Image (tube, grey):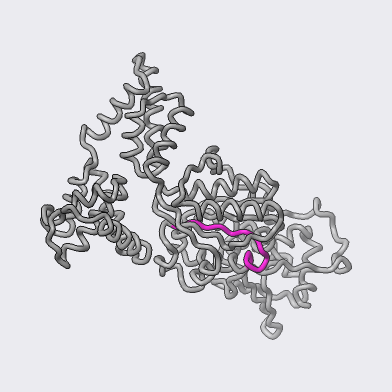
Amino acid sequence: MYKQHLRKHLEAFFSSSELEHWFDPLDVRPEPDKKVLHVAFPHIFFRRRFMQHARKGFEQALSSFAEAPRACYEESPHNRRFAPAFKPGIDERSSGPQADDRETILPLPDENSLLENTSSLPEHYTFENFLFNNKNDLPVTAALETTELVSSGSPPRYNPFVVYGLDGSGKSHLLGAMARTLKKKGCKVFYGNIMTFPALLETAPGRCPASDNTCIFLDDAQRVSSCPDIRDALVALTDLYLSSHKLLALSFDRHPSACPELGRPLLSRIASGLVVELKRPDLDIRLNYAEKRSSALNLNLNKKQLLALASQNTDMRSIDGYFARLAAYTAMSSKNGLSASARDAYDALTLKETGHARLTPELIIAVVAEHFAVDAGELTGKRRDGKLAPARNTAVYLCRELLNLTLVTIGNIFGKRDHTSVLYAVKSVRKRCEHDNDTHKLVEELKQKCLSRC
C-alpha cells in the first residue's frame, strides 16, 4: 500500500512510462519513526544507473511527500533478483500533468534495438555455413531443434541450452546461427558476449528480459566468474527464463563443471538444461571450409595450398584470420603496382610468417619434454614409466589436436604403440582438461608454445 501511495504522488511529477522503468522495480520500505525510506534495487547495475540519472529528481519529489522521508539507499542489493514490475490499477493513476510537460530524468531505452542486438554477428554465422560431420551431430541437431521450437512459439525443450568446446570449435558461430534464424522468424533476440550482459540489465531491470518471444544468447560465459555481480544476476535471469519458458543459450570454453568459480547456484541451474560439447572440426571439414572461403574471396588457391592451410590451422577462426591476411596482402601488392596472384601471395605470406619452419611431431615432443623436464627420446621410446606417462599422454594429445594425425601414425611415432593406446591417451587428457582447470591451462599454454616456435 505504501508503494502505491508513493507512486500516485510521483505521477504528479513524472510520466507513467518513466515510473514503470525506474521506480516500479525498486523495493521501498519506510521507517515512519525515523522518517527514513529504505530503497533497494533489483541488482547492482540498475542501482548504478538509478544513482546517476534518477536520484536527484526522485529526492526532490520525495521532499513533498507525507512526512518528507529521507531516502536511504542500500549499499549493495539486498535482493539479487529481477523484481517484478509494479503494475497499479487503472483507477489508481492520477490525471496529473501530461508527460510532455514533465522532466525526463531517466532516458528510456529503445527496447527493440536493445533486444535485437545482432549487429555483432558476422554475416556468415548461419546454419548453412556451419560445416560439421557426425562427431558434432548432437550439438548441431539440438540447436536446430531448439531454434525450430522457439520460432514456432513453443517452449524450448532444452533450457538453458549450453554448448562448450575449445577455442575455435565454432561455439560463437552456432549460437549466432540460432540467433540470426530466430530474429528472421520475428523473435526478439539479444546476442552478445557475457561482458555485454550488464548493458541489458541496466536498461531492462525487471520487465524487458522476460518479454514475449525474447531469446538471450551469451557467449564466453566462463568469464562471468571474474565478476560476482554479473554471476549473481545471471543466476536470477536463469530462474526467470526457466519459469517463463524463454530460451537462454550460453557457451563456455570448457565443461561448466570444470569452472568451480562459477558457484554452485549457477552450476546447478546450468546442469538442469542440456550441456553438449562442440568438438573442433576434423581435417576434411576444415578443408571444405577453406575451399568455400577461397572461392567466396576469389583467391583460387590450388588444392595443395588449401590442404596445407587446413592442416596447419586447427580451427575455422585461424583459417578466417589467414584468409584475411592473404586478402590484405594481395590488395596491398596490387596497390603498390605488383602483379602478385593469390597463389604467389600465399607462398610469400607463408614464408614471411613461418620462415620455412612448420609444426611437426618432433617440435611438439621437444616442447612437452622441456616442460616436464624429461628426455624427448624417452617420450617416443617403449619404456613404461609412471613419471613419463603424463608427459607422453600430453604429447600424444597435442599431436592429435594440432596436427590431426591418425591414431596409427601417432602410435608409430611414439614407439610403435597400438592405436587403442593412443586413443586412450587422447581421451584421458581431454577428460582432464574438461574437469580440471589447471590441466586445461597447462595444455593451452603448451599449445601456444608449440605454435609460437613454428
Residue 280 horizontal/vertical position (percent): 40, 49
> Which quarter of the image is occupied by the C terminus?
top left
Residue 82 horizontal/vertical position (percent): 63, 67
Residue 342 horizontal/vertical position (percent): 37, 23
Quadrant position of residue 369: bottom left
Could you tell me which residue is drawn at 69 percent across and 53 percent down?
108
Residue 128 is inside the magenta segment: no
Quadrant position of residue 10: bottom right
How many circles with numbers are drawn on the protein? 0
Could you tell me which residue is drawn at 14 percent across and 65 percent down?
385
> Which quarter of the image is occupied by the N terminus?
bottom right
Q: Is residue 63 left or right of residue 335?
A: right
Could you tell me which residue is drawn at 36 percent across and 14 percent down?
337
Does residue 265 sit above or below 362 in this rendering?
below
Does residue 305 sit above or below 138 in this rendering?
above
Q: Is residue 406 left or right of residue 68?
A: left
Q: Nearer the viewer, residue 124 or 378?
A: 378
Q: Which residues are magenta?
A: 240-252
Q: Residue furthest bottom?
A: 33
Could you tell me which residue is drawn at 18 percent across and 57 percent down?
371
Q: Is residue 185 left or right of residue 283?
A: right
Query: Is residue 71 visible in this depiction of the protein?
Result: yes
Query: Is residue 59 visible in this depiction of the protein?
Result: no
Q: Nearer the viewer, residue 84 or 428?
A: 428
Q: Nearer the viewer, residue 451 or 137?
A: 137
